[in-house]
Image (tube, rainbow, N blue to C red):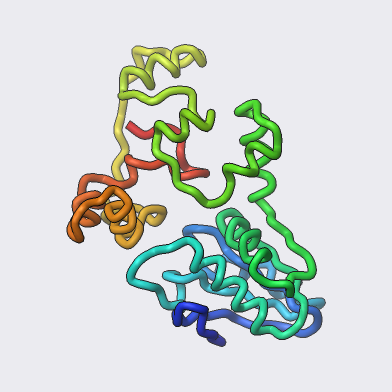
Amino acid sequence: MDQLISRDGTPIAYTSTGSGRPLVLVHGTGASHTRWAPVIPALSRQFRVCAMDRRGRGESGDAAVYDIRREFEDVAALVEALGEPVDLLGHSYGGVCSLEASLLTGMVRKLILDSYDWFVGIVADRRKMTHEQALALADGSIFTGRQGLANHLVDAVGGEQEAIDWLATKGVDGKLKVIEWKDTDKPGSFLFSQSMAKMAAKVLGLPDAGGDVIHELGADRLFLDGLVSVWHP
């Protein structure tokens, strides 16, 4: 794989296949550049396809502390490294990174946001918002339950009984057995890494070890996490 150095010194890896007008591919959260493998052969017939590994994934490096703005800079760095206007395709969370990266460089010819636009549309429709209101919330922010409630992203904040009562209003039998699923394969979540937990601890004014405490207590339950957020106890 080829490699470039992002603004903060982090190495970012990417593949380059084919020839023609550059097309940069930015994958979603739980993936790497390999997610694009099924479509690269077809795309590379018309484009020079550059599929990056976002920081902390695949063969790219990472920083000690997570900052979403660095991800935007990574995408912009790859775009500018290619030396000519590019078409930029971002899938899922990669769409957020691509959208913000397009504001950092003038080298984006076309911007394709894939499921990002689709998801914003779903939120606007189901939460009874205008597209502009939903778009304003779709900036990569992580919301607490109360923030989600204030922004009309959730109907209520509560515990297990409140969730059962809410489901009953949707026709779900309140007497069904409640089963809590736990991921026993790995600690934490790919959506809430150790570095993100430490960042949250810093925001909350906790000491250096606070991030470890948050992570061990189950950081996945403290925040809404986009596409996979159904209900958190």
Q: Residue at x 21, y 56 (%)?
A: 212
- Could you tell whether 146 is left or right of 194 in the image? right
Q: Which residue does the image show at 46% across and 16% down from the upper left?
A: 172
Please state the horizontal and vertical placement of residue 161, each as a whole percent of the image. 32, 18
19 versus 41 height, above or below = below
Q: Is residue 85 left or right of residue 230?
A: right
How many numbered marks, from 0 up? 0
In the image: residue 93, left or right of residue 220: right
Q: Is residue 148 visible?
A: yes
Q: Quadrant of the N terminus?
A: bottom right
Whether residue 52 is situated above or below residue 97 in the rendered picture: below
Residue lying at 55% horizontally and 73% vertically, measured from the top left? 74
Q: Position of residue 14 (x, y in %)?
A: 57, 79
In front: 65, or 229? Answer: 65
Residue 88 appears left or right of 228? right
Can residue 185 be seen from the camera position used here? Answer: no
Residue 90 image-quadrant placement:
bottom right
- Rendering coords of residue 122 (x, y %): 65, 36
Q: Quadrant of residue 119?
A: top right
Q: Indicate whether 94 appears above or below 129.
A: below
